[in-house]
Amino acid sequence: MLAVAPWLLVLSLLGQLTMVAFQTQMTMIDLMVYRNGSPEIFTGLLYEWRLSEFSDKFALPFTYPPFSAFVFLPLSWVPWGVARWFWQILCLACLYWLIRTALKMIDAEHLSRRAMLWTALAIWVEPVRTTLNYGQINLLLAAVLLATMASSRPWVAGFGVGLTAGIKLTPAVSGVYFLGTRRFAAAVWSVVAFALTVGFGFLIAPQLSKEYWFHLLGDASRVGPVGSSINQSLRGALSRTVGYDVQTGPIYLVAVAVAVVLLVWALREALRAQETLAAIVVVQVFGLLVSPISWSHHWVWAVPALMWLLYGSANRNRLVNATAIVWVLAIGSFLISFLLIWQDSIWTIPRPWWESLLGWVYPAAGVLTLVAVAVGLRARNADPRTAEETSSPASEPQPADRR
């Protein structure tokens, strides 16, 4: 397969770009929100504005901080066709960079060809496919985070997390990685960078910033329907199971507590084994699990997770192998897309038991990933043949540029 990897990549890219050119259903609706909504930062109506086109069930609002509207503003200066093509090419480049960086961090053999092969395949898995179809920002954020978090320079690592969190809050969970690795300087830099984005928002749009940070922050219902099948967080899966929104009640808190325990276990084993990619992946998966809303396209982190499961140091462990198979089936089957078609309404939470069960696919795979990393690396750490490789302090990170 590696021999034909460049040709497969060319064919995949041609297929994708052909869809951009001719498929009318590829509306890139989220990109339209970024582009059309961002100028409203100057009218003071950014959070009252709605995109009603192509959305008969839920007119989409602008849900990110004011700083992100300023970042997206240049997209409104060019025609829609230019913005559309630019975003697609940027996201495809980020996908290749994300995969290549992940493979490089685990010293995978035949790096270039393997990165081309997996990019060619990953274009057609559900989280990536829907990110491209919606014109979402997930691939860009993931590529920036993976490229910067493991940097040996604290300010680079910190600014990567702080700036991405300033655009979209969810990358803020990456700070857990800095605390776990005791990279306190990077953690401080991330706080500084994030504070700068918030301060800049108050500078250019003080009223909107007050509205967002003191009133809209935490309102999951404004982002979208919590119980819809496309929400693949623990809260979404639990809500579909019990038939109502669990919100931040006892059921949700117990699930979060379990996820925290698994995170600590997996992160500890990853740091003992000096597995930077595994440590970053478990933190990002944890963030997707505990976030109130994690749309299926947010799970692009399944791709670097799969790279570690397939090529990482614990890839001979049976649970690790089984988890890789689960992810291939989960993201390759487009199950979430079918569940979206089968559900009666995006707003109706109660549903048949089998729909609720299948709606656990990404959260279940995420939990399994945390367990597989912990178990796989614990077995590797206990192997006397790896004792010399893991003899340095567990708290010391292994940045990508040092591996």
Image (tube, rainbow, N blue to C red):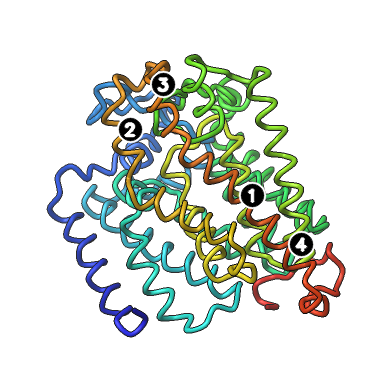
Query: For mark 4, what is the residue?
Result: 271
Q: Residue at x 69, y 66 (%)?
A: 275
Q: Which residue is mark 3?
A: 48
Direction from residue 204 to residue 382 in the image, left or right = right
Local crowd size for mark 4, using a 10 Å CA cut-off: few (<14), some (14–19), many (≥20)? many
Rendered residue at 71%/63% (across/down): 377
Q: Reading the chain from its start, which is encountered first: label 4 or label 2?
A: 4
Task: Work out whether mark 3 precedes mark 4 in sequence or the reverse, and give the earlier one.
Answer: 3
- For badge 4, the amino acid type reads Leu
Q: Secondary structure at mark 1?
A: helix
Vertical order, 380 against 2 (above or below): above
Give the residue type at disc 3: Glu
Residue type marked 2: Leu
Q: Which residue is at the front of the view, 169 or 378?
A: 378
Mark 3 vs mark 2, CA separation in Å: 31 Å
Q: Give the left or right position of residue 83, taking residue 300 as reference.
A: left
Amino acid identity at mark 1? Leu
Q: CA distance from mark 4 to mark 1?
A: 14 Å
Callout 4 secondary element: helix
Circles 2 and 1, Cβ within 8 Å, touching? The answer is no
Q: Earlier in the sequence, mark 3 or mark 1?
A: 3
Between 281 and 62, the one lying in front of the other is 281
- Are dots 3 and 2 in contact, CB under 8 Å? no
What numbered label is drawn on residue 370? 1
